[in-house]
Image (tube, grey):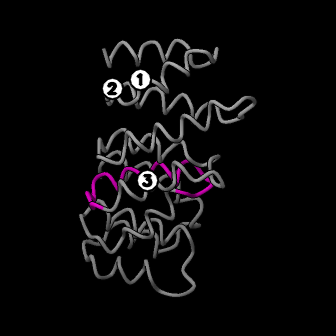
Amino acid sequence: MDEELRSLAERLRAESGGPAEYERLLATADLDELATALTAPDRPLWARETAAFRLGCAGDRRAFESLVLLLNHRDPERCVSAAHALFVLGDPRTARAAAALATNELRVAYALVPVRLLTRLRAPESVPALITALRRRLAPGDPHGRVALACVEGLGALGDPRAAPVLSAARAHPRLAAAAQAALARIG
């Protein structure tokens, strides 16, 4: 069992109440059984999450939609697990979905993990989405400083010169100034 699956299993053990189904979903190698658990009616969230994570990590694209929903969940641990599985899955739709979540102003409180996933993906959608998200976070009084910082760090890691104007503007924000300066230095 790899570290990501171990973390998911420990977190969901308490949520599941430890039934036999929990153990079966963790142990099965049958992707069709996991897909059934993912789509069957009246399934608890822990079962769907386990099935989606396992399918995604196995490269089975039937998990994509469920993983995107979990990437936008209010529980940060669910988001992190979904981001890992989406990255491993390698579905070409992932970057578009993460960009849509990172730039959705109605869900900005949950944008931190999609922003980090965009950085990790290094996809064509990554830089434009991070620029858009950061520009919005630079508004006076914006309460989403962690999302802004993740955007700054991501743009620095991606090193795309298109980010220079928004990173320059971010230097005027005390909580972002050092990270923005470092990101600009990486861009050159």
Q: Quadrant of residue 136?
A: top right
48 shown above or below 42: above
Q: Do tag 2 and tag 3 residues touch (Cβ < 8 Å)?
A: no
What is the number of the mark on residue 98? 3
Nearer to us in this view, 66 or 184: 184
- The residue carrying pointer 2 sits among few (fewer than 14), some (14 to 19) or many (20 or more) residues within 10 Å by Cα, namely some
In percent of the image, x 43 and y 53: which residue is there?
98
Tag 3: amino acid: Ala
The C terminus, quarter of image:
top left
Q: Position of residue 82 (x, y in %)?
A: 43, 56
The answer to whether 184 appears left or right of 41 in the picture is: left
The local secondary structure at tag 3 comes to: helix
What are the residue bounds of the magenta stretch? 72-92
Residue 1 lies in the magenta-colored region: no
Give the alpha-carbon distance from disc 2 to disc 3, as whole Å: 21 Å
Circles 1 and 2: CB atoms closer than 8 Å: yes
Q: Identify the residue under disc 1.
A: 164
Majority secondary structure of the magenta segment?
helix
- The image quarter containing residue 62 is bottom left
Report if residue 76 lies within the magenta region: yes
| Residue topped by disc 2 | 161
